[in-house]
Amino acid sequence: MARSYRDITDAELAVMQVLWERGESSIRQICHVLYPGGGPSQYATVQKLLERLEAKDFVYRDRTQQVHLFRPALGREELIGRRLRSLAEQLCGGSLTPLLTHLVKTKALTPQERAELRALIEQSENTPRRRGSKG
């Protein structure tokens, strides 16, 4: 199955994970996390991945210093939402219900997780729907 241009590869996701956990970082700093003891080819790999992520508007680059710094432009939650909506479109005709039902049935939820889900449901019931949104 072909990826959409805006999708993210596993290697790009690894870079995003570093940025989400560490915050603003240089290529070298990201390289040290992903490839401890790595050399020039690993540095070039991280540089290329960051260029791709920047082209997709997933990261911001600060060019004001000699060493460019990168930070996430896309939050983890937003990426999760995009992927779940895409998966729901592909597998469930756009409905998230089968995905959520499967997750709840296959993993025992802690009391805290159940409380959080109940709070989300209550919040969504009290929030007016946007026009054109699917339920």
Image: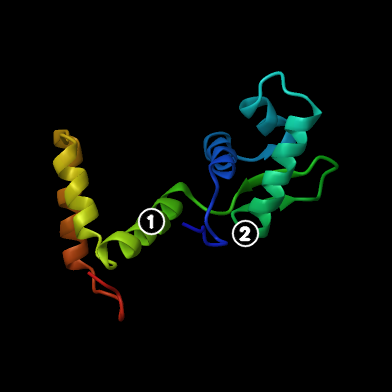
Q: Are marks 1 and 2 in contact (CB under 8 Å)?
A: no
Q: Secondary structure at mark 1?
A: helix
Asked if residue 69 lies left or right of residue 100, the reply is right
How many callouts does the rendering have?
A: 2
Which residue carries the number 2 mark?
Answer: 56
Q: Quadrant of residue 11?
A: top right
Asked if residue 99 lies left or right of residue 35, the reply is left
Q: Most extreme residue toward the front, as rendered?
A: 1
Across and down, in percent, residue 118 comes to 14, 50
Is disc 1 surrounded by few (<14), some (14 to 19) or many (20+) residues within 10 Å? Answer: few
Q: Secondary structure at mark 2?
A: loop
Q: Quadrant of residue 31?
A: top right
Which residue carries the number 1 mark?
Answer: 81
Across and down, in percent, residue 16 comes to 56, 42
Q: Residue at 75% of width from left, 33% of height from top?
A: 43
Q: Most extreme residue toward the right, as rendered?
A: 66
Amino acid type at image mark 2: Lys
Amino acid type at image mark 1: Gly
Location of the C terminus by quadrant is: bottom left
Front residue of 124/39: it is 39
Q: Residue at 59% of width from left, 44% of height from top?
A: 12
Is disc 2 surrounded by few (<14), some (14 to 19) or many (20+) residues within 10 Å? Answer: some
